[in-house]
Image (cartoon, rainbow, N blue to C red):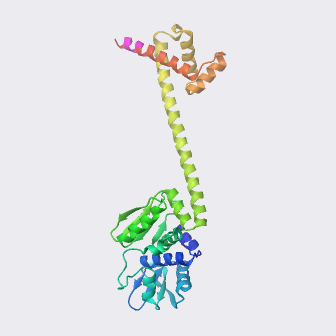
Amino acid sequence: MSFTTRIKNEISGIYNNKNAMMAELSAILRNSYEINSKKIEIVTENSTVCKHIYNLFKEIYNINIKTEYKNTKFSKNRLYMITILDKLDFILKDLGVLNDNLTFKEEVSHYLVDSDDEKRAYLKGVFLMRGSVNDPKTSMYHLEFSVDKRKEALFVSNLLNEFYLNSKVISRDKGYMVYIKEAEKIGDFLRIIEASLAVMYFEDIRIYRDHKNMTNRLNNCEQANLEKSILTSNKQIENINLIKEVIGLETLDQKLEDAARYRLKYPESSLEELSQIMSLETNHQITKSGLNHRFRKLKEIALKLQTEKEE
């Protein structure tokens, strides 16, 4: 079972007050229905969603509803159909789908989404019909609504953004896609439609992935620092060997000679580690900064010797 299906099954068990249920039904009809003068037909691949829509119509309009399913060669899943034959004009006008002259109403009626509960319900209805969410275990976070009409897509996006979800709209070959990419915002959307179990699953996976990514970044940073430390150590050893070859380490003052000999003795130690080793073995405290200063002096001597050697 996909993550999207799990979410739809969960929220299909939630029923709110009458106004919210009307907002949800309006979204369902505006985003997935076929209509003629004799019937309203709604099609879904989810049996739980089908039952939920059936219950909504029964609760609000108390009408006779026909439900059936069929298998098609175009879909590996069954298609569940809800057919309404009674009170067609009244229902479609009441839910803000048709105007008084029975033409499609481009704008969603404000009275249907007047409160936050009604807005949440409308988004829930759109998601049941046209929404999908990537499982957070996949490589990217993605929530989308596939909407036919431009005005409806813009309305859904604006509704999402009233809850600060940062949704965007793009045109497709057929219709429009309203989408959210940010993991935190997707989690917020799941809270908005009251998908509590889905939120817990989503957040657990998101936290795990974020922790894993942070660990990987730290490991990469440590690896980069280690490589940098090795390169620096190798360069210091080159400088020391040049000094040793040309004038001998014993010609250096004691502090520089100690730094040079300890670097040759501990070639893989970082500057911090080497300063601690020297402090312990010589009984003279030396800081990382002080040791770095000595190696800069050794570098200057090596560069001078190299220049003289080339001349």
Q: Looking at the image, is 283 positioned above or below residue 99?
A: above
Point out residue 300 in the picture as x, y percentages from the top left corner: 44, 15
The residue positioned 48% from the left and 15% from the top of the image is 297
- Asked if one can make out residue 1 in the rendered structure from this viewpoint, the answer is no
- Asked if one can make out residue 111 in the rendered structure from this viewpoint, the answer is yes
Point out residue 105 in the picture as x, y percentages from the top left corner: 37, 78
Name the side, left or right, on which 18 lies relative to 176: right
The residue positioned 41% from the left and 70% from the top of the image is 146
Q: Quadrant of the N terminus?
A: bottom right
Quadrant housing residue 41: bottom left
Point out residue 116 in the picture as x, y percentages from the top left corner: 52, 67
Q: Nearer the viewer, residue 29 or 117?
A: 117
Please, what is the dominant secondary structure of the magenta stretch? helix
The residue positioned 41% from the left and 13% from the top of the image is 304
Q: Looking at the image, is 172 positioned above or below residue 310?
A: below
Name the side, left or right, on which 38 lies relative to 199: left
Point out residue 25 in the picture as x, y percentages from the top left corner: 49, 78
The residue positioned 47% from the left and 75% from the top of the image is 112
Quadrant housing residue 275: top right
Q: Nearer the viewer, residue 34 or 310?
A: 34
| Residues drawn in magenta | 304-309
Image label count: 0
